[in-house]
Amino acid sequence: MFFGSVTVAYTMSFQELMLTYGYPILFFGVLLEGEAFLIAGAYLAHRGYFSMPVVIGLAALASILVSQVYFYVGQHFGQQFLTRRPQWQQRFSRVQRLLSTYGSTLVLGFRALYGLRIVIPAAVGASGYSWGQFLLLNLLGGLVWALIIGLAGNSLILLVEPILDDIRHHERMVVGVLAGLGLAWAAYRLYRQPRLEQRSTRSPTE
């Protein structure tokens, strides 16, 4: 049964996959690229396919889970990682300086620092930060992030929908575009990341 479902899903377009297996796709999409899939989920909730509280709850859960995993990796394997990849040392050191300056505020609001969402929880874990304290702030920060982005996305949809009179005839296309843009941006970041790291290691001001 499982493999049959996978085969069917593989033959579907991405838009059909999003609408048919919406909640799981939303969850894993937020794990990879948060905002785009959360806004797509808010759109589906607005159209009546999803429940907005479930969308926000799943997005918060995915964001909290992945951040906690990065913290755990940094806490247990951070020094080994830095030994093998010394070019990351500057980034970890910078985050630890920010942590000493801003403390809990950094842990609570790091999701607003786009491009540092992996580095910050990993570096905080490697710094010896309390697991329990990080979990508490991560729970609160993840919920606030999901509420803000989800409700802001819903408000944006309400603003744009009157302009697009025929939007209900293109629901799958809209969802596909939103999620596709998120995947494209994630791929671009993966492509650019090694080059940005090389530049940061060469820069004398870093």
Image (cartoon, rainbow, N blue to C red):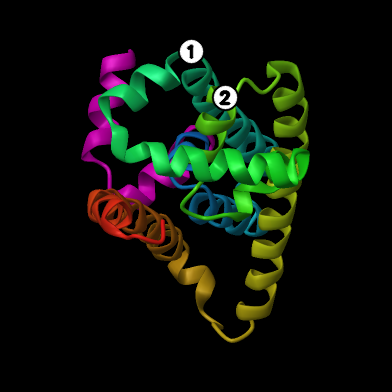
Q: Name the residue under label 1.
A: 76
Q: Where is residue 204 in the image (x, y as percent from the top left)?
A: 34, 60
* Horizontal side of residue 24 vs 153, given as left or right: left
Q: What residue span does the magenta drawing correspond to?
A: 1-25
The C terminus appears in which quarter of the rendering? bottom left
Q: Mark 1: few, some, or many residues within 10 Å (few <14, many ≥20)?
A: some
Across and down, in percent, residue 92 comes to 47, 38
Q: Can residue 148 be seen in this view?
A: yes
Separation (CA) of disc 2 from disc 1: 8 Å
**Neighbour tally class for label 2: few under 14, some 14-19, many 20 plus, Cα within 10 Å:** many
Q: Residue 125 carries which label?
A: 2
Considering the numbered disc 2 on the image, is that residue within a helix, a strand or a loop?
Answer: helix
Tell me what residue is drawn at x 70 percent, y 48 percent: 109
Q: Indicate which disc, 2 or 1, sits on the residue closer to the N terminus.
A: 1
Indicate left or right for 68 with 108 as reference.
left
What residue sits 77% from the left and 26% below the top?
136
Percent x, y of residue 171: 47, 63
Question: Are the residues flagged by discs 2 and 1 in contact, CB closer than 8 Å?
Answer: yes
Mark 1: secondary structure? helix
Instruction: Tell me what residue is drawn at x 46 percent, y 52 percent.
Output: 115
Is residue 183 located in the magenta-colored stretch of the structure?
A: no
Which numbered dot is residue 6? none
